[in-house]
Image: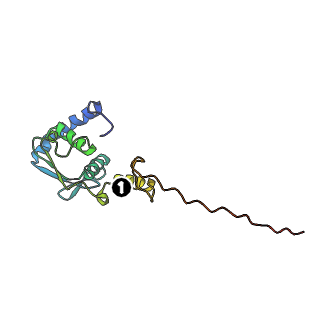
Amino acid sequence: MRLYPPSHPAVAEALRQIGEALPALAALGTVEWKVGVTGLHWHGQHLLPRNAQIAELAGLLYARGVRAVTLNPGITAEHVLALFHVATGTVSVDDGSLGRIALSGSAPPCRRQAHPLLRKRQRRTKRRQSPHRPHLPKLLLPPRPPLPPHPPRQRRRRSRRR
């Protein structure tokens, strides 16, 4: 999803397949999927639980604050492509390119609710930061105070035995 430009043949083929599946989806009427960290849910059922691509899409949408995807009749493959762009962060959640797809949810999640990969990245950057100074560019930090001078060391006298 993130590795290929929209003009790539694999993306074109995927959009063609999505376009073929849309009439069957439109026959269902309005469909609402709940978005979880690990996947999409419809009527309490986990949709395609072993599909890694669906799990990644759901995780990315969840990390951006999307909690529900509503598909209305009349959606096109371009609308679905826009949904992928929302997941990757190149299009905003309320962009007009989504067309008949409505996204709803809460404000961007707090750190406790973030996607597991985002939490891992946050922990790594937190570990890299010094515990004594905040992580700010060096230009914004005040200079460190000089260390107090050490008292001169006194040498021990050794007693020599003869």
Mark 1 surroundings: few (<14), some (14-19) or many (≥20) residues within 10 A? few
Q: Residue at x 19, y 59 (%)?
A: 44
- The image shows a total of numbered marks equal to 1
Query: Mark 1: which amino acid?
Result: Arg
Pick whichever, 3 or 147, lies toward us: 147
Q: Residue at x 31, y 40 (%)?
A: 2
Residue that carries the numbered disc 1 in the rendered image = 119
Residue 10, position in %: x, y?
29, 33
- Choose top left, top right, bottom left or bottom right for residue 76: top left
Pick whichever, 121 or 33, lies toward us: 121
Q: Is residue 160 left or right of residue 13?
A: right
Q: Residue at x 10, y 41 (%)?
A: 74
The quadrant of the picture occupied by the C terminus is bottom right
Residue 27, position in %: x, y?
10, 45
Q: Is residue 130 left or right of residue 71?
A: right
- Choose top left, top right, bottom left or bottom right for residue 95: top left
Q: Is residue 53 above or below residue 34?
A: above
The quadrant of the picture occupied by the N terminus is top left
SS label for mark 1:
helix
Q: Is residue 140 left or right of residue 95?
A: right
How is the protein colored in the picture?
rainbow
Residue 25, position in %: x, y?
14, 45
Q: Is residue 59 left or right of residue 148?
A: left
Residue 67, position in %: x, y?
20, 54
